[in-house]
Amino acid sequence: MNESKSADQDKQPQFAIQRVYVKDLSFESPKVPQIFKTEWNPEVKLDLSAAHTELKDEEGLYEVVLSITVTVTSKKTTAFIAEIKQAGIFTIKNIPVEHMQQTLSAFCPNILFPYARETIDNMIIRGSFPPIMLAPVNFDALLEQAKKENKNNKKNDTGNQTRITV
């Protein structure tokens, strides 16, 4: 009976965060110090993408990378560009195939987003600008939108990247 329980446990869905880390980080402010002398009227452009790779080291181990680029202009002048690639390693096993894209392209980026948001605000503050405090992102809705756009554009699905522009 113990073997039966063990076999059932091996088939149970498994999800675990192994590690969360910054893979790449960049902050540019091309018009400093002149930008500080102008009236602050920021326009924020946010570009998000999520990509995943199955790691060959161990079955069910995936790296998910959430890339965020924040471009802020004031009076049509670029104030700053903040970029981050926030990554995580996740153990994902026994998830039905039809749920894997949702897990890798929405659920995992949702976990990574608060880390990225905090790091971006920290960079912006260190650049002597007011924080922009990115609003939470509904990755599930953005994934559905990306699927519809891909279907409408009849593009080939790469399967491991979801690009979203807000």
Image (cartoon, rainbow, N blue to C red):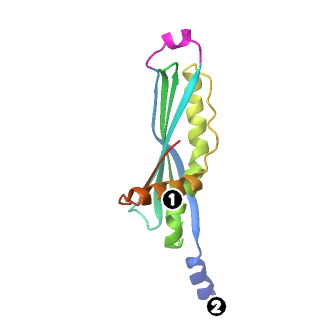
Examine the structure image and report whether residue 34 is included in the region drawn in magenta. Answer: yes
For the point 55% across and 56% down, which residue is it?
A: 106
Residue drawn where x is 58% and y is 61% of the image: 16
Q: Position of residue 86 (x, y in %)?
A: 50, 44
* Magenta-colored segment: predominant secondary structure: loop
Whether residue 104 appears in magenta in the rendering, the answer is: no
Residue 142 visible? The answer is yes
Give the amino acid type for the residue marked by disc 2 in the picture: Met
N-terminal label among 2 and 1: 2
Label 2 crowd bin: few (<14), some (14–19), many (20+), radius 10 Å: few
**Residue 80 place in picture, x, y as percent:** 49, 24
Which residue is identified by label 2? 1
Residue 142 at what x, y percent from top left?
55, 52
The amino acid type, in three-letter code, at marker 1 is Leu
| In this view, 43 is above or below 55 | above
Observer-nearest residue: 75 or 64?
Answer: 75
| Mark carried by residue 104 | 1
| Magenta segment | 30-40
